[in-house]
Image (cartoon, rainbow, N blue to C red):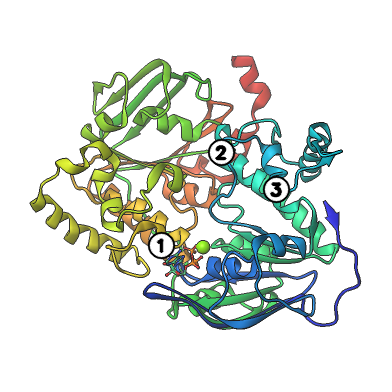
Amino acid sequence: MDVDTAPKPAGPLLALRGISKRFTGVRALDRVDLDVHAGELHVLFGENGAGKSTLINVVSGTFPPDEGTFQFGGEDISHLTPQRARAIGISPVFQEFSLVPSLTVEENLFLGREITRGGVLHAREMRKRAAALIDELGFDLDPSQRVDDLSRAHQQMAEIAKALLGRVRLLILDEPTASLTERETGRLFELIARLKSQNIGLIYVSHRMREIRALADRVTVLRDGRHIRTLDAATSTDSELVELMTGRKIDLLFPTITHKPDKVMVDVENLTSADGSVRDVNFHARAGEITGIAGLVGCGKSELIRAIYGIEPIASGTVRIDGRPYEFPAPRRSLKRGMAYFPANRIVEGLALSRPIRENASMTALDLPAFAGFGVLRQAAERIAIKGVMEQLQLRPPNIERPAGMLSGGNRQKVMLGRALTRELSVFLFDEPSVGIDVGAKLEVYEFMKRLVGTGAAVIVVSSELPEVLALSNRLYVMHHGRIAAELSGTEKTEQNVLAGFFREHLLAEVA
Ligand SMILES: Nc1ncnc2c1ncn2[C@@H]1O[C@H](COP(=O)(O)OP(=O)(O)OP(=O)(O)O)[C@@H](O)[C@H]1O
Ligand SMILES: [Mg+2]
């Protein structure tokens, strides 16, 4: 990456004054001021729908503000376009991915800024630079792979790499760690420290308090599109931030879940997926408890539940649901067998963005071809139920007839979770349930799982967030390279033991 080593400007690197932005029916930003200094990491903190991504979009030239002024490097900026923003060194990594799925990582990196020699694409040079950049970042990413073949975490890495190609003065990261695990997160944090020492300014959006603590110099709290306060990270407390964010006091603890393990609802024997990402796995989940699955990116934990649900083809092994063999799992049949699945990649797999939230939140959406088959009566009942659940999850704005595409990232995730409302289901598979959800809503989601378990459902939670999966689960599996590396319960269920399970390479190699 090229680094701008120009002397630090006297004033702030970025200065926003009175920025407002309206969407149909919503005032996303209401006269917001923000200063970001060179070498500073400035966190934007706020509930889902508070206006964080909108602010980032304004700064990156995605759309113009309705009012307000904007200075960058001491110069007045108007009529900003994404191209112009990049040219002056404003480099965003958006919450929703922007890569072209059918192209490779390196093609994406150089898209729109291809290196040519004598008017001809200089593929070798681009390949070399892409590899050098990825190497410098320390990401385990193959630049010649197609983006649609990559896991979400690897797509995230590619997005970050793309933002760092070229001259960067302000790097903007909108929930960059949402799908990274500890290892990649660590790499990213090292990178951030380097960028700061090179006097690059950073805007960072996260709902994770631990990250804010580790990284932030200052925090700006937004609520309902308004600037509430900007604080020094060092002198503010978590509860102070959360209180400013929500306007009320919130207890930040995980709920106490009483697990009452009952009969085995999901029983998996010697399961191997067709692509080998799951290998010879034995696993079970019981009614009345939360079963957790932890592991690094690419360990096969998501693929395991996807295989059970019928999205990941199975090569061999057996799956039993509620004691009965379940051959050739397929999503629609899984639903009929009482299983619900909540994907981590809510955009690609989950939501019909042009359809209302109500339809998206309904279980029928998981069963798309049958959409039209449901009767009018059922729809009316559904509307009431969905309204209730979405209120509980604090949907913002609380209108279930808006298209899902108009929602902020975290609110989209809530819509996915809203699907769990259907009562007849007995098995719930959650892949990264709290990705992108604000602190208050996260607690609601946990409460929600607690209620599911209380009513005797089997809940399986795949999560890269260790504190989350440790706190929620009664029994915890740790996966490594497609296999179960450990099963922990009771007092063995500690962060240390999970981490030990992550790195049991040699031990497992012997078994293989
Ligand atoms: N393209 C759009 N069309 C209509 N409304 C939008 C659009 N994008 C955002 N909004 C609305 O603007 C408000 C702010 O959304 P924004 O995406 O900035 O929230 P956010 O703070 O990033 O939330 P999250 O933490 O969930 O990502 C929300 O009420 C959202 O519904
Ligand atoms: Mg957002």
Amino acid type at image mark 3: Gly
Which SS class for mark 3? loop
Under circle 1, the secondary element is: helix
* Mark 2 burial class by Cα count in 10 Å: few <14, some 14-19, many 20+: some
Residues 49 and 165: in front is 165
Q: CA distance from mark 1 to mark 3?
A: 28 Å
The amino acid type found where label 1 is placed reads: Met
Q: Are marks 1 and 3 in contact (CB under 8 Å)?
A: no
The x, y position of residue 70, in whole percent, is: 67, 79
Q: Is residue 71 left or right of residue 66?
A: right
Sequence order check, earlier mark of 1 and 2 = 2
Tag 2: amino acid: Pro
254 versus 317 height, above or below: below
Residue holding disc 2: 101
Q: Which residue is mark 3?
A: 112
Please identify the quarter of the rendering in which residue 201 is found: bottom right
Examine the image and state in which quarter residue 307 appears: top left
> Is residue 487 visible in the rendered structure shown here?
no
Question: Viewer-nearest of labels 1 and 3?
Answer: 3
Of the two numbered discs 2 and 3 on the same chain, state the one appearing first in sequence. Answer: 2
Tell which of 487 and 108 is nearer to you. Answer: 108
Quarter of the picture holding the C terminus:
top right
In the image, the residue with mark 1 has its CB under 8 Å from the nearest atom of ligand 1: yes
Q: CA–CA distance between discs 1 and 2?
A: 22 Å
Residue labelled with disc 1: 406
Label 2 element class: loop
List x then y, in percent, for residue 450: 32, 53
